[in-house]
Amino acid sequence: MKKVSLTIPPALPISWKPKPVSGAKSGSRVLPDGRIQYWIEHDLLRGVTPDMLVWWFKHLEGDIQYQGKTLNRYRVWHPEDHVHVSYERRLPDGSVGPGAAIRIVEYLGRNRKYLVNVVSPIEKLDVTGFIHNPRVFGWLPLARMEYEFTAVPGGTAYRNSLIIGWRGFSFRLLRPLVQRFIFDDRHGAAWIKHNIEEVGQFEAFLSELYAAENPKQSKVA
């Protein structure tokens, strides 16, 4: 795993209006197989198509022009919580898709207790959704991220799911310890808030960025 600074940087000096948690449906439950799921059904993502989302997750690195400044695009996506993203592993042709892996560093709510510092192999990335599987310490498969995209009039219906644990009797036994010491409901609530804010931020920049970097592609109607 590449060495990356874990220092919390100052929030980006830009104006933004994060969407409130109340603007989405969210919750948690224990799945039939014993894993813990935190889920979000976002408010309509206006002006953004599934094609734009797929392109975004394949082009997370680099800078963009935003509000008259040259800024890291990943940090624009969440100006307060995001620290670093890079592709730890690309496909043989240099592209990004299933088989590649992302390095992610962020602090949910800028809280040092809620550091995300993972390498996450990509399992799926297409217009129906995105699945990646964060590995703690670069190898421990403790979580699964599932995104669902559905094109609707005016934008995209966007659903997120964070699943903690693994299938099998061993996790059923360990779940109380995981919930107490590793990922409790306060941690889950911090993830839900963070995710609602970053997904809502797509409306502020993604359509314009996609048009600028893909001039032959059409925008959402």
Image: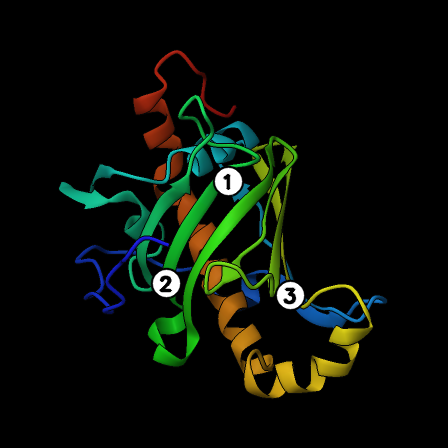
- Disc 3 marks which residue? 26
Q: Secondary structure at mark 3?
A: strand
Q: What residue is rendered at 19% in x and 45% in y?
A: 71
Q: Nearer the viewer, residue 163 or 127?
A: 163
- Disc 1 marks which residue? 46
- Disc 2 marks which residue? 106
Q: Are marks 1 and 2 in contact (CB under 8 Å)?
A: no
Pick whichever of labels 3 and 2 is earlier in the sequence: 3
Q: Quadrant of residue 203?
A: top left
Front position among marks 1 and 3: 3
Q: Nearer the viewer, residue 191 or 69?
A: 191
Q: Is residue 166 visible?
A: yes
With respect to residue 136, does 74 lie above or below?
above
Q: Is residue 121 left or right of residue 171?
A: left
With respect to residue 178, does 75 lie above or below?
above
The x, y position of residue 120, in whole percent, is 50, 51
